[in-house]
Image (spheres, rainbow, N blue to C red):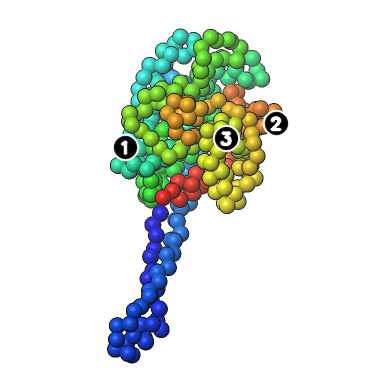
Amino acid sequence: MKRLFLAVMAFAVVLLASCNGGTAKQTTKSNTVEASVIVPIFNGDSAYNFVDKQVSFGPRVPNTAAHRACASWLADKLRSYGAEVVVQEAKLTAYTGEQLDARNIIAQFQPEKKRRVLLCAHWDSRPWADADPDPSNHRKPILGANDGGSGVGVLIEIARHLSMVPTNVGVDIILFDAEDYGTHAAETSTMENSWALGSQLWSRLPHNPNYNARYGILLDIVGAPDARFYREGISEHFASNIVDKVWKRAAELGYSDTFVNEEGGIVTDDHLYVNQFLGIPCIDIISHSKEDGGFGVYWHTMKDNMEWISAQTLKKVGQTVMTVIYNEK
């Protein structure tokens, strides 16, 4: 953070020395005034439009045309905001044995800076609506407006601001692929860790072999009008101080009704592998009901569409995250 230094001269001492014509020993005192940090205003409507754009491609399921088209759009959009973009392509094995053409999309802002912060979300959508109340939908892919699209929409809007107002630290935005290709609810699998395949890959083989960041913030399912973000269990275990930092900023912004400062449940998500494999303390901002263990009536159903996206909620999440990263020194 930039600091403003003001030298304050003791006027009476100067005047006395001048009158005596001598060089009396003088003591000067400097007061350090910390300049206020200017945090850009996050635009919830813009983030909403970025979610809508993703949904317009259709379900973003690996090995589909919609998935490939959306990947190209995401990479190009982040490049248009001045980021150095790396697309990490790999064949990932799903629990079904199917080979998935996966793409982790990594956008680096101010890559020359050693002090860095990681922001991430998953951009793929669930290949099956296996939680839908209608059994006929259990093999149909979902649009994933909230589960995937919302976090990405927030991060693209943050990227837009990073292109205009740089932070003091470098920022990396990583969009993980194949997060939602985990075992179908009606099936069993002997594969461990069938979820979050893209983050498992990157956490073991980061785009930069020496990659490190002070901390990471994962966004998942952050768009619903009634979203409530509790202090998620894995985040508390690995990075409780980062949870404190984020929830404190949210409270200062007046968002305590959404960022509830209470313990929530444990959610296996992309942040688990960033913590375990790479050792970067990473937290998860995720709407998760600690009462019933659910993610909302739309979760993994055909209802996960734009009707469950609120520009106001996106604003709260985005403004909170931006206030955190713009205050990093």
Name above or below for residue 96 compared with residue 323: above
Q: What is the x, y in percent for residue 56?
A: 47, 30
Looking at the rendered image, the disc whose residue lies closer to the viewer, 1 or 3, is 3
Can you give x and y, in whole percent of width and height, for residue 18 in the image?
32, 87
Which label was assigned to residue 236?
A: 3
Where, quadrant-wise, is the N terminus in this rendering? bottom left
Q: Earlier in the sequence, mark 2 or mark 3?
A: 3
Amino acid beneath label 2? Glu
Give the distance between the C-alpha atoms of the residues marked 1 and 2, in whole angstroms: 42 Å
Task: Select label 2 or label 3 by which is in front.
Answer: 3
Residue at coordinates 49% horizontally, 34% vertically from top-left?
Answer: 282
Q: Residue furthest right?
A: 291
Distance of label 1 from label 3 (alpha carbons): 32 Å
| Residue for badge 1 | 84
Mark 2 lies on residue: 291
Q: Is residue 50 visible?
A: no
